[in-house]
Amino acid sequence: MISIRSKLSLWLTGLIILSTIIGLILFESMLREAFHDSIINRLEEDLEHVILATRLQDGQIEIDHQQLSSFYKPAYSGRYFQLNLPNQVIRSRSLWDVELEIEPLADSQKRVWQAKGPKNNDMQLLSIGIGSDDTPNTATLTVAQDLSIGRRVFSEVFGTKLAINIGMLLAMIAGIFIILRQSFKPVKKIQQSLAKLRQGEISALETQHIPSEIKPLAETYNQLLDYTAKQIERSRNNLGNLSHGLKTPLAIMQQQVEALGLTDPDAAIAMQQQLDQIRKMIERKLAAARVTGDMLPAAQMTVDKDFTSLLNTLKKVYRHKTVIENIHNPQQLSRIPIHREDGMELFGNLLDNAFKWTDSCVQLSLKKQHNHSITITVEDDGSGVQQDQLALLTARGKRLDEDVMGHGLGLSIVKEICEQYGFQLQFNASEHLSGLAVSIVIPLNKPAI
């Protein structure tokens, strides 16, 4: 979906472009009309001047050129007049050897039109019919102006206006993008803060330097985070208290069952089964409570720091063995999208199991796949597991070798954490080492915790 910033940019840019185009069309129409009116007004003035310069001399109509503008003297100057009499045509010197084709008009009749003139240029013409009460014949006086010069001026004025408008349009579009970019900077900071919150770098959104329009939203989000964190912490504390509170009654009941076994073995076995189920249920619920899942943003597990810490701790635990550990991270992944406490428990159990069964080498591999997932594999060079026994590894309390010390809950807790987060847990024979390879496939198409 298109962002608000992009939508505003497109709408405002389109509105400005449309307004500029409409303004240019209106300006061109008004300029063209003003240009045409100015030419007609000048032709009407020229018409009056020519009429004033016309006189009757010895029965002949003459036009005194001395009373006319000097524009009518040079050949093809662009200003012309022509008087059409019944038996004579009087032209301005500027027409030179060109005679205009004029339609005779009745007395006081006017005509405005355009036609081709000298040098095949367009001309604007104005004609008027001149008559007398003494004679039925009328003369037609025509004045004309070449349009090429005026059109060149028109093009220059409109071109200048067009260039100015385009410059202003580009400036306004740039201004829109700059203003929107500056206006949405606080939103960008909120987005960056949410990313940091998701990665666990901060615990709440900063609300001091954000606009008042979105400040209530950020404050409400912080309140929700605080409330949810307190609720989770309270639930964990209650479960922990419940676990510790049940230990003493269960211990007493265990003693009673052992005593009962001396007198009634069958009843003791039945009671022992129920006690075992209670212990398993408590352990399962405690393990689920430790897994926060996607409920709250929290500190993610870092590859270099946390995995190195786990390996160093296990080396001290298994100091009686000489183990070579190796972290293979060719893509330099820095974070794992899992709550740090859950990740330490998940991979701590896997690495603990690898150290327990290895002969001399443990390898941790991290790889980002093309299907937008991360595969983390823990391998050892121990004796491995038979293919038909791999499914038994995640059974709670089930161990394939009872001679090795351990409570047998590690891999089942790993399975519960993976199910809570939606990770894939895979058991295979190691391709690089001779032992077991346990892989965790972490999808990246869901928001990081």
Image (cartoon, helix red, strand yellow):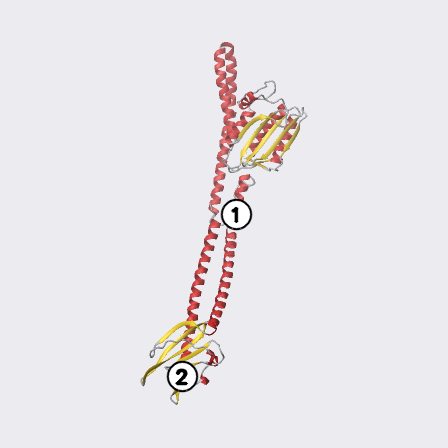
Q: Amino acid at mark 2?
A: Leu
Between 297 and 138, the residue placed more toward the observer is 138
Give the camera-side residue of 256 and 298.
Answer: 298
Q: Residue 331, percent across and down?
A: 61, 37
Q: Residues within 10 Å of mark 2 (few under 14, many from 20)?
A: few
Q: Residue at x 45, y 56 (%)?
A: 15
Badge 1: few (under 14), some or many (20 or more) residues near its Cα, within 10 Å? few
Residue 73 percent coordinates (x, y): 48, 81
One can see residue 261 in this view: yes
Q: Residue furthest top?
A: 263
Up the image or down, 214 lies above or below 161; here it is: above
Query: Label 2 belongs to which residue?
Result: 52
> Disc 1 and disc 2: Cα gap in Å?
78 Å
Name the outermost residue toward the bottom.
58
- Residue under label 1, please give it: 188
Classify residue 381 by image quadrant. top right
SS class, disc 2: helix
Q: Position of residue 412 (x, y in %)?
A: 54, 25
The mark nearer the N terminus, 1 or 2, is 2
